[in-house]
Amino acid sequence: MLNTIKCTVLTLLRTPGVMVWSLAFPLIMLGIFSMMFSSLDDMADMDPAPLAAVRPAADADASASGNADGMAAAKAEAFESLMDAVSTGDDRLFTLMWIASAQEAEELVRASLADERPLLGYVELVDDVPVAHVRDSLSVHTMESAEALILTTVLDEYVARTELAAQLLADDPAALADPQVAASLYESVQATEQVEVTHNQPKESVRYYFALMGMAALFGGSVGLVAVQRMRPNASALGARRAVSGLSHGRAMAATLFACWLVNFACLTVAVLVMRFVVGVDFGNREGACLAVTATASLTALSLGCAVSAIPKLPESTKSGILTGVVCFASLFAGLYGQPTMELADMVAASAPWAAWVNPAAQIAQAFYSVMYYDSFGSLLVHVGTLLVMAAVLFLLAVGSLRRQRYASI
């Protein structure tokens, strides 16, 4: 059996069609996807927007006698503190530039329009109320419109807090004398707590990579198709010699299938390693689970190739075309071919969940998805178990078909 395994592996490695679909295809597609989706994840990350702010006049900073002047000075100081707060730290919203006057700020915004990242606009205090001036070229469909909305929200919160301070000063003039009370009026309210609900940070592009791995794994079924075809006594001289050899047909088939699985698993593992260390898809130190998914996907693909190869009275080229059609059709409902097919796959999965459970490409993609995002391995075991059931059913169909075939002469 060891000689059979060795000879089968060497034969498959020397078969151009097998290596193209099992190894070259996923590597080429990973490179293409990497170039296509390199900016997709960057678009989801919002960089701090450049913004100008007019520093309040110096006379507003002086604490004069009287509540009105004191309140104006407090508002000016609070405005500066607010703008500094949203433009500092790792999670800052803006990169701020302090300008002496509104005219200079407007000229600076106009001059920045030729830059790659122009200023969002500028903010100034008008009658102790912050007013935002944003570029009139903003579109409702651009990222800058969202940044302008964020700026408006920040200033609205500031206005609400200053009104609260004014009401507090009117009711109790001595209340703001306490530094802690004054500081609490402009502190950020932590109304929500940020938690991680997934094992890794979600990324839009990984759906396409996982759908690609489903397609690449199933194309590995060509390994099983070619190997089983070579074992058929009426398909080749090699098959005829194997049929009359001293090794039983069952042991020869088992050794051949193991060699096919080994080749397919090795090729798919190379693709997974490229996806992890070259493309940069982070599985959160769960590479071992990825190898388990890869091994199961290789087995399912092998069973699919064997089932197609067992179809009687068809030439090998026709069977290869059938396998390609099945893989491409399954990948369609895994969402491989772009955003429209992703939406179609989601719609089908929502309206007919059974369609996703009988789709091996979708199950392989979901298995990788479970490795990356779920804290436990419960979901992964479900998808792996589904793939094993598919493999068992396809192997039984292949064995049943092959056992019924008889040859009058070899």
Image: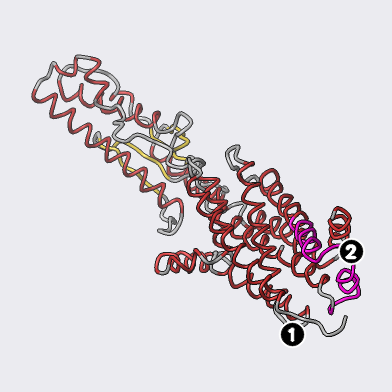
Q: In the image, is 12 to the left or to the right of 289?
A: right
In this rendered view, identify the residue nearer to me: 31 or 42: 31
Query: Residue 313: which disc?
Result: 1
Tell me the kind of residue under disc 1. Answer: Lys
Answer with the quarter of the image where residue 226 lies.
Answer: bottom right
Q: Earlier in the sequence, mark 1 or mark 2?
A: 2
User: For the residues marked 1 and 2, what is the alpha-carbon distance in whole angstroms?
Assistant: 27 Å
Secondary structure, mark 1, is loop
Give the labeled residue for mark 2. Answer: 246
Q: Quadrant of the C terminus?
A: bottom right
Q: Magenta stretch containing residue 237, yes or no? A: yes
Highlighted range, magenta:
234-261
Secondary structure, mark 2, is loop
Which SS does the magenta portion mostly show? helix
Disc 2 crowd rating (10 Å Cα; few below 14, some 14-19, many 20+) is few
Q: In the image, is 245 to the left or to the right of 387?
A: right
Q: Nearer the viewer, mark 1 or mark 2?
A: 2
